[in-house]
Structures are given as C-alpha cells and as structure tokens.
Image (spheres, helix red, strand yellow):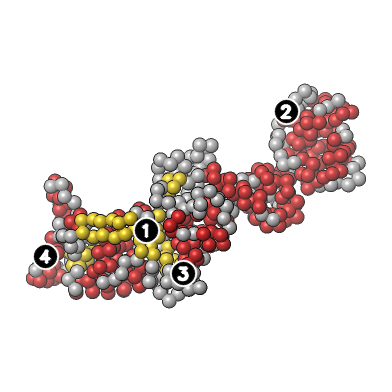
Amino acid sequence: MTSDVRVRFAPSPTGYFHVGGARTALYNWLFARHHGGQFVLRIEDTDRTRYVPDALPDLLDGLRWLGLFWDEGPEVGGDHGPYFQSDRLDLYLQYAQQLVDEGKAYRCYCSPERLDAMRDAQRAEGLSGYDRHCRYLTAAQVADYEAQGIRPVIRLAVPTEGETAFDDLFRGHIVVNNAELDDLVLLKSDGYPTYHLANVIDDHLMEISHILRGDEWLSTVPKHVLLYQAFGWQVPIQAHLPTILDPSGKGKLSKRKKKLADGRDMLTYVHEFKQAGYLPEAMVNFLALVGWSYDGETEFFSRPELIKRFELERVSKSPAAFSYDKLDHMNATYIRGLGANDLSGRLLPVLAESGAAADIDTTLALVPLVRERLRTLHDVVPLTDFVFGEAPSYDADLLLQKGMDRAATLGALRAAREALASAGRFDEATIEERLRGVPEALGLKLGAFLGVVRVAISGRKVSPPLFGTLAVMGREKVLARLAEAERLLEGAA
Ligand code: GLU
C-alpha cells in the first residue's frame, strides 16, 4: 500500500536522544506505518554553536534500538535529500534571496549594538521585537551599508496588519494578530539559515504531509504559516503532541536529572534505558501510551497491533505523565513473556558487561530461576553474580540463622556438604530431596538450615530458588563454597 502520508522526525544534534524525542519519532513512525506512508529522518544541524558531535550516533543507535527505521534520511538516502541541513545551505540562500527579490523579505544591517539599544528603548515603551528599521531603507541607504561591507541578515517582512490562522489537529483553530509577530530572521549574516527558514523549506521540498512534533513548537507555527504563504506553498497538516510530564505530573520531563520516590535516578535519555536493561519492545509499547490510548484500557500491544491501531484521533489533548512504575511493570511483563533462548541471549551481554564470566549454557539454565524476578535485564547481575564469580565475601555472622549458634551452624554446613557430596546425581530434584532429609536429624528447622546453605553459596540472605541454583552451579563449586563457609566460621571464633 502506498499513500501520500509523509512525515518526518527532525532532531537537532545538540544533545543526546531524549525519551520525549523518542515518543515524537515513534508517533511519526507509527502514523507512517499505519497509512503505508514514508517516515523521513532529517538532521537539523544548522546551529553550529550547539553542535554535539556524539549526538548523531547516539540518535541513530537509539532509533535503531527502538526499531524505528527510517525510509529516507542519513545512511539510507532517498529522493528528497540531502537529509542533513548543513548540506542544503545553497538552497536556503536561494529561497531567501527569492523572497528578497519579491519584496517579501529584506536585508537588515543593524549592528548588535543598535539592536541592544533598540531593545532597551522598546522595553521602556513596553514593546518588544525588532523595530523594522531596515525594512524601509532607501536604495541609497542600502548601497551605503553594502559599501561599508556590512554583512546583513535577511528578515521576513511580516504583514503589520491582519491575522494569521491555522488549524492544529489537537489544539484546534489558532489565530494570532500579525501585529504581535516579529520580522523574524530567516538567514543569518554567516549565510546559515535559522530554524524557521530551513524547517519550512525542507518540509515543503520533502513533501511532508503532516507535522507531528512536541507542542513546544506550537508557537513557531504562525511564523511558519507566514513563510509558507510568502512562498505560495501549502501548509502541512499540523499536529502538536501533548507535553510529557514527570511522574508527579507537576513538571515537564526535562533533561535535568531528578530522583524518583524510591531514590533511583529518573532516566531521560534513550541510551540510559537501554543501558539499564529495558527491552526495546517494552519501551515502544510504553511510549506509545504516553499521550495515546486505544480504548483507554488495553495496555499491551505488539508492534503490529500498535501499527494497526494507531490513529491520531486517539492522541490525548492534555499533557501525559511518564510513569516509571508503569514502565517497570511493563518491562517485567515483557521479560516474562520472552522465550528462554531469547531471554538468555539478552542476559548474556548484560552479565558479560558486568564482568561476570558468564556462558550461554549457564545463563540459559538460570532463566527459569530468575525470570520472575527481573524488572530489567540488569537486575540479573546482583541476582546471579555469585553463580559466576569467585566465592563472595561476607561476614561470618551472616551464616548464623535464628535460633542457631556457631556449633549448630557448623554442623549444618558439614551435614549439607556430606549430603550433597554423596548424592548420586546433581539435579534440582535430587538436591532438594537430599537437603530436605538433613535438618530433622540435627533438630533444625528446614528454613534455618536452608538459610545457612544459601548464605554459604551466595553470601546473601536472598537468592533465586536455592535447589535450582545449586544445580546450575554444579557440585564442585557448591561443595567448595560450603567448605569455605566452614573455614570462615571456624576462623571467626
Ligand atoms: N529541529 C527541531 C528539534 O530539534 C525540530 C522541530 C520540528 O520538528 O519542527 O526538535
């Protein structure tokens, strides 16, 4: 199916890829896929002062991680390129010149000093914006400035009367008085376009049908509408997405780090979610619901279902809070839904990165033991590091369980070691049977006895299910840990 829907995601490489940007990219992508249209990626890199070299690879990695592949743009090309604005400077120059030639824009030679003084004067009178000094220069004055070698900017000659109106799919009909609009700069004196000029020209030349972006850009639309009108171009359909709020619902989800109620950092960059062990499919499902719903109830959608159901009519008009709890819940659910091979394949690199000498067979064997306990992939590390690493170091007192002294604990360790050393097989069922047979003869409670074994092998009071974990670790390692615990306890006397 082909359609006329062409949407774009147009980030500026001025910082890392933020989840708010990811939500915008996702909605554009879903909208394009739903309609069989095209999703264009355009890099708005004309602000050289704010350029961050790492930002582009971070963005492309993040989009790929989320599976938001673009039909046209960097690396893939397309019929409407180039897709980096810095490679399109000649175009902007040419179109700005066209507007000057048609009397719809003009060169402004005002020095920074004059602009400062003007602003002060304007402020004193309660006015703002450029006073249009250069809009009405005579030919002789222009020639004079040119003779002085002053490099002008180009400004749009905004109508001083009348109104500019447009419709936004979510915000409705918006009207502004032209008198409130400034003669905005289109081209800077260094020949670089402003955001406004480049954005409008590119959306037109790239035949963008719908502009879906964050509502912080809403205030730029009247200026853009005037530019479209000046060029005689059709304005793309406008759809400004609701603001994303932090979990409290009070402030915007900003780039500044805040803490969650449980003390964790509020993650905001896409790579941070990846690093922390969120699954891309959970992230996509979650982000889709930050400002959109299908029926107000259903929470879980596969990617094909999202594509099928995603309609702009169901995008909310009010700001949407970003709930980390909901994301965690969703991620845990997605993790539980993964097949064992799939999950172990995702856990292995996380374990390896943590420094654990993990191998795929052991990781696969651990999957049934840890799957229910993972909120993120990363949670596997503290749960299982003792399985792979050396014997953990812990305080001998940790071995002592309620109602047990040193002697009883030593007896328990010895008995556990003997029971496991003489077990015929070392699988979960045999281990369970052997260990359950021990405590009664020693006059110990089962829970306390197993508590001793747990600390001896893991150095912790909490671990994944014990019998299965012991089986995965193997007899040799388990016996060594039990013997090590005995030595630790004897030494602590
Ligand atoms: N370059 C702008 C940004 O950084 C694009 C805004 C738009 O989509 O028009 O988000």
Hey, which residue is sitting farthest bottom in the picture?
A: 79
Residue 241 position (above or below residue 92): above
Question: Judging from the image, what secondary structure is the residue with disc 4 in?
Answer: helix
At x 49% / y 59%, what residue is drawn? 310
- Badge 3 or badge 2: first in the primary sequence: 3
Closer to us: mark 3 or mark 4? Answer: 3
Q: Looking at the picture, which amino acid does disc 3 mark?
A: Gly
Residue highlighted by disc 2: 397
Residue highlighted by disc 4: 136
* Residue 261 at x, y percent in the picture: 50, 37
Q: Is mark 2 within 8 Å of ligand 1?
A: no
Residue highlighted by disc 3: 37
Q: Is residue 272 visible?
A: no
How many numbered circles does the render carry? 4
- Asked whether the beta carbons under mark 3 and mark 1 sit within 8 Å of each other, the answer is no
- Badge 3 or badge 1: first in the primary sequence: 3
Question: Judging from the image, what secondary structure is the residue with disc 2 in?
Answer: helix
**In front of the other: 423 or 394:** 423
* Cα separation between marks 4 and 2: 87 Å
Q: Looking at the picture, which amino acid does disc 4 mark?
A: Tyr
Closer to us: mark 3 or mark 1? Answer: 1
* Cα separation between marks 3 and 1: 19 Å
* Cα separation between marks 3 and 4: 45 Å
Residue 432 position (above or below residue 445): below
Relative to residue 413, is residue 95 drawn left or right?
left
* Cα separation between marks 3 and 2: 65 Å
